[in-house]
Amino acid sequence: MLVHPQFDPIALQVGPLAVHWYGLMYLLAFVAFLWLAKRRARMPQHAAVGWTERDVDDVLFYGVLGVVLGGRLGYVLFYKPDYYVDHLAEIFAVWKGGMSFHGGLLGVITAMAVFAWVRKRGFFEIADLIAPCVPPGLAAGRLGNFINGELWGRPAPADLPWAMLFPQSGDGIPRHPSQIYQLLGEGVLLFLLLWLFGRKPRATGQISGLFLIGYGLARFVTEYFRQPDDFLGLRAFNLSQGQWLSLPMILGGLLMFAWATRLNLRPVA
């Protein structure tokens, strides 16, 4: 079987200043979002309603706040509420790790709602613009998980060609490299689906609805290969916390896509 390379989590260090790979993955995610969103803003269906590259810069500012605050608070509330009740000061210790995608999503939704109110734009107009630009950032995050050797997978057959030993697990069991599965599902495949679908004008709400469906399904499936958190284990019906949090996304996405399609809302253009 393969053995995890045991990368140094610090990518660059100059004196007391240390730059971690996971932090670089966040930077990569934001840069990729900015580049892709500016390309989408130049598409005829978005440029026709006044989207500019400067608007994208402002969207990113709101989005960063939503990701960081929502991701951290989501982790605190969804995964370790009992611990943080007794350690309130550590809620803000983001450098110790602990971010939740589902919390980050709620944070971004809130941030985009504020942006829509400030700029007098439709919420789903904004969501449809940015949705295809998010998956590359998710892929970067999963790559960061793999570099850190964290969030490893469940036990895998020893004859699986890509079964991997994660020394951090401390048990010597070959496991699925679930971080790579999630990188491919939540990142690469979801990006291709949304980018190709979003190249043409669509009914308002369809693209963001498809994002919810696609991410929810990819996360639900890949969670079967990811080792549940020790402090949570599996929940009802042997589903992980990530799977339970993904189910409302899938249902909400289906309802949103059906609503947009049935009402035959006018495309953004």
Image (spheres, rainbow, N blue to C red):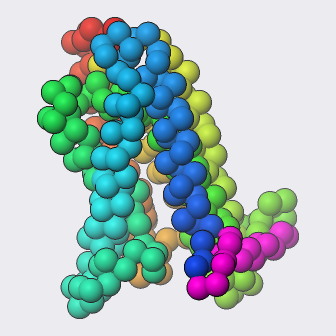
Give the side of residue 239 with respect to residue 196, left or right. left
Taking depth in this image into account, of 86 and 247 the one nearest to the observer is 86
Q: Please name the residue shown 46% across and 18% down the image.
A: 42
* Number of numbered markers: 0
Q: Is residue 247 above or below residue 82?
A: above
Taking depth in this image into account, of 154 and 40 the one nearest to the observer is 40
The picture places residue 40, in percent across and down from the top left corner, at 47, 23
Taking depth in this image into account, of 148 and 38 the one nearest to the observer is 38
Query: Is 9 included in the stretch rendered in magenta?
Result: yes
Q: Which residues are magenta?
A: 1-16
Give the side of residue 114 with respect to residue 166, left or right. left
Q: Is residue 210 above or below residue 3?
A: above
Query: Is 269 included in the stretch rendered in magenta?
Result: no
Q: Is residue 240 above or below residue 79?
A: above
The picture places residue 246, in percent across and down from the top left corner, at 38, 51
Image quarter of residue 58 = top left
Q: Please name the residue shown 75% across and 77% down the image.
A: 6
Q: Please name the residue shown 36% across and 27% down the image.
A: 128
Q: Is residue 182 visible?
A: no
Task: Single out the residue that lies furthest toward the front.
Answer: 15
Q: Quadrant of the C terminus?
A: top left
The picture places residue 46, in percent across and down from the top left corner, at 38, 16
Q: Please name the residue shown 30% across and 53% down the image.
A: 66
Q: Is residue 120 above or below residue 226?
A: above
Q: Quadrant of the N terminus?
A: bottom right
The picture places residue 80, in percent across and down from the top left corner, at 32, 78
